[in-house]
Amino acid sequence: MDSYADWLRARDDEALRALLAARPELVTPVPADLTALGARAATPSAVSRALDRLDRFTLAVLETLLVLPQPVPPDDLVQALTKSTDAAADDVRAAADRLRTLGLVWDDGGPLRTAPGLRQGLPHPAGLGPPAAEAFAGYPAERLTALVADLDGAEPRGFPDTARLLERIAARLADPADLIEDAGPQARDALEQLAWGPPVGRVAEARRAVRVATAETPVERLLARGLLAATDDRTVTLPREVALHLRGGLLFRDVTARPPAVDAAPPRSPELVVRTAAGQAFTAVRLTEELLERWGVEPPPVLRSGGLGVRDLRAAAAHLDVAEWQAALLAETAYAAGLLARSGDRQLAGEWLPTRAYDLWLLRETADRWTVLAAAWLDTDRVAGLTGERDDRDRVINALGDEPVRGSAPQIRRAVLRALAEAGPLDADAIRARLTWEHPRRRGVLRDRLVGWTLREAEVLGLTGFGALAPYARALLDGEGPAGLAEHLPKPVDTVLIQADLTAVAPGPLVPELARELALAADVESTGGATVYRFTAASVRRALDAGRSAADLAALLARHSATPLPQPLTYLIEDVARRHGHLRVGTMTSYVRTDDPAVLDEVLADRRAQTLPLHRLAPTVLASRLTRAELLEALRGLGLAPVAESPEGGVVITRPDSHRAEAPADSPARTFVQDGRDPAMIAAAVRALRAGDEAARRGAELARSRPGPPPGEPPRSPSMATVDELRRAVERGARVWIGYLDQQGQASSRIVEPVRVEGGFLTGYDATRAAMHRFALHRITGVAEVDTAE
């Protein structure tokens, strides 16, 4: 097997599907054939993403392959790893198999080779620098000669070439014990700092010419003896042979074949865990609904820079009686699920509103609604924990803005939850230690903070209880529905207990229709195991303003009350309804109209109304310079109950039930998202790669079998005759011989099967190139027929 592409081509379909499932970015879009797939797999971005998926031990196996001379016999790989780590031979073979599945290692049934691009992706495998022959390859011949003379104690004889000098240096550094001893203890300390990596250091004038006899400082003594190699004017590198000697021949000193052992918290009762988590899941759904219902009636504005204002976030947190970070989490999760969006376009200031998908979400069962939220949280790259912090330019990061976006967030969330699923309840430090082993290349401050944020957010959203992952969350993590959640959720009720003190007690979660109507006609007084609503004159007027009549409201409450309606509530509804709408406010800028002149007399006589610019136009009409909305609020402040009036005299509902925004196309409401690519898409990609490979092979054979253009100069003919002949060739399906000028004016002969002539171009199959091509008509010098027998 000559190349990496040949190895890919020899893999069976199951192995190719495993490769593409593990590295789905390789088929976005699908390459033309397996050769193109191999080239894409060797690009720096593809190599980096593949390396990011490796755990510490598998990465160590790959680094060992890069250190050992290739191709590497499997037994040599096992020997090197078992000597430097606690791994057994089976652990090494399993890791090599995984690397082979990922396409990072290939073989022909014997020694192992690393895939193209890996040496650039891992420039210092195992923390080691290059071999001495590579480290000193940039030295001029006279500098190498001086170095060999100092190492051997005598000038080289004759005129040795550079390759021979490098071989002698490498051979001398294979056992550098006496050189290190001769350099002195301070020089050895400097080498020890580079021994376990990184193997590069910075010094001033690294390329200065020094000899053993003239070296004064520790670094100069190391340079003169070849124990350090100058890479450029300010960088020195520790040769691999010297580092291995200092390490005692070991490649690693702290690599283990399995994750580090951590002490998990004492396990809780599974029933207690699932009940606690389910209670939090129900609370998250209820709070999300309450938040979006409020914003549907009183939407907060979108900041000019995008996002939600700090004041609006605080108001939402106060309304929900939660911390600000929890309110930000609920808003971000609803936004990621497509339940919340901004109105208008990004160029104009808008409002944050529930979407039409939110109305459909309300119709679903509570478990399904939770699934939408949890799946969106798992897969969103938005990080609610960043809300309220400052960015690189010292600006506040707002919720729902463009700033709290981090591409690594979904992977870290899933990694944290999988750690909980495998090891049980763990604290943040234990999970960070585990993730450091599982994904050593993804370390950083952000990752460590994301671990803590994920743990607290998973608890608030109901994925965990007492630090343990709930069983239904395990199913969601595996790409399935939340099996078992519904049976642990409280059942929605459609009855309330209305008491004589003008309160209504909901003994559990209400069905959506009743919950929305009760939230409109009453104020929430307390929440918990039971929700307490209080009816007031303002809340009843709010329902009447929204278009409900007194009869409708009384009938609704009577239908859902476990007891007859108390008389105080009936009196309250009738009293508010009796006064409601007596005054009507229009625009003139605005006016006040009533059928009873005495009511206007009371208004004008009220001292508080003296600040209002009211003018009596008729016994039953007052006019004002205030807008209709301002006049409505002012009259309500006087204890009156006016309603808005349209120019035609009809009642205007001044409090719409809710506003809605269109959901953005890139964040639809989802049920759940499967981790990884669809197997059907992977299978289709493999079929397309096989077909592309076969087409390329046949095209090459056809190109070799087809004769080249006829001998002689390319044909020439008048322009109109050329176009007419090409069109006749399209009609006949014949092949033609054309002369064609490239962009540099060079003429060439082509054998073409014309398909279409239009728009100043000839489109056809170029038999001389074995590919479809588009020719500009003005560059075709002429056309001649080709005998079909050719």
Image: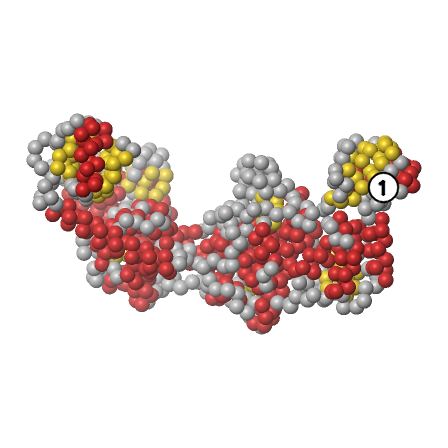
Secondary structure beneath dot 1 equals: loop
The quadrant of the rendering that contains the C terminus is top left
Q: Residue at x 9, y 37 (%)?
A: 710
Q: Is residue 761 visible?
A: yes
> On the rendered structure, is 551 left or right of 218?
right
The residue that disc 1 covers is 594
In this view, the residue in front, 291 or 350, is 350
Q: Residue at x 78, y 59 (%)?
A: 554
Q: Is residue 703 shown above or below 467?
A: above
In this view, the residue in front, 409 or 500, is 500
Report the coloring of the rendering.
Answer: secondary structure
Q: Residue at x 60, y 69 (%)?
A: 488
The quadrant of the rendering that contains the N terminus is bottom left
> On the rendered structure, is 85 left or right of 699?
right
Q: Position of residue 736 (x, y in %)?
A: 15, 38
In this view, the residue in front, 242 or 319, is 319
In this view, the residue in front, 154 or 512, is 512
Q: Is residue 419 visible?
A: no
Q: Residue at x 33, y 38 (%)?
A: 235
Q: Position of residue 721 (x, y in %)?
A: 18, 30
Q: Is residue 394 shown above or below 563?
A: above
The quarter of the displayed image where residue 260 is located: bottom left
Residue type for callout 1: Thr
> On the rendered structure, is 253 left or right of 787?
right
Q: Is residue 495 shown above or below 224?
A: below
Farthest left residue? Answer: 711
Q: Position of residue 84 (x, y in %)?
A: 33, 60
Q: Position of residue 313 (x, y in %)?
A: 65, 46
Mark 1 nearby-residue class (10 Å; few <14, some 14–19, many ≥20) = some
